[in-house]
Image (cartoon, rainbow, N blue to C red):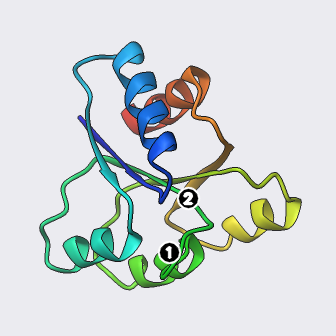
């Protein structure tokens, strides 16, 4: 199993990797600091992941813009938003994207992982 994180904050990458290792050390991770890089790999079919965690606020291509472009591709990897925003409008907006399976407030917690992986295994 591989989980990818798309977030421009390297501290979030550290927390993500640490949390994943503590949860299950057999889960592989990929971290992208730039959503355009991840999107380019998706478009060229070089992206391999079972689950994507996506931040909303990023430079160049924010999470919303990424989702618009992602949904134009043929991939159907489940995406969860992992954001520092607890704005109800952001949470509601996330429901407009068929690829978004959930919305979590940072930091990533074990309970978040458990919920995502339980849904993935069904």
The percent coordinates of residue 89 (x first, y second) are 85, 67
Q: Is residue 83 visible?
A: yes
> Which residue bears the numbered disc 1?
67
Would you call the spot at circle 1 few (<14 residues within 10 Å), some (14-19), or many (20 or more)? Answer: many
Residue placed furthest toward the right: 88
* Quarter the C terminus occupies: top left
User: Residue 111 lies in what quarter of the image?
Assistant: top right
The percent coordinates of residue 6 (x first, y second) are 42, 57
Placement of 39 over or under 120, stated as above or below: below
Please name the residue shown 40% across and 70% down the image. 35
User: Residue 76 lies in what quarter of the image?
Assistant: bottom left
How far apart are the alpha carbons under marks 2 and 1? 11 Å
Q: Is residue 122 visible?
A: no
Placement of 122 over or under 89, stated as above or below: above
Please name the residue shown 42% across and 42% down the image. 13
* Quarter the N terminus occupies: top left
Q: Give residue 93's mark.
A: none
Does 91 sit left or right of 65 as displayed?
right
Given residues 87 and 102, the one toward you in this image is 87
Given residues 4 and 18, the one toward you in this image is 18
The percent coordinates of residue 95 (x first, y second) are 69, 65
> Mark 2 or mark 1: which is in front?
2
Given residues 75 and 89, the one toward you in this image is 89
Provide the secondary structure element on which disc 1 rests. helix
> Which residue bears the numbered disc 2?
55
């Amino acid at each position: 199993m591989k989980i990818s994180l798309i977030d421009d904050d390297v501290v979030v990458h550290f927390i993500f990797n640490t949390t994943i290792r503590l949860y299950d050390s057999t889960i592989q991770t990929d971290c992208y600091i730039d959503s355009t890089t991840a999107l380019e790999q998706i478009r060229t079919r070089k992206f391999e992941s079972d689950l994507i965690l996506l931040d909303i606020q990023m430079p160049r291509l924010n999470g919303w813009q990424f989702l618009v472009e992602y949904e134009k591709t043929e991939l159907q990897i489940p995406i969860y938003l992992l954001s520092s925003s607890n704005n109800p409008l952001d949470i509601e907006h996330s429901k407009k994207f068929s690829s978004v399976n959930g919305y979590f407030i940072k930091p990533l917690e074990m309970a978040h992982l458990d919920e995502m992986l339980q849904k993935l295994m069904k």
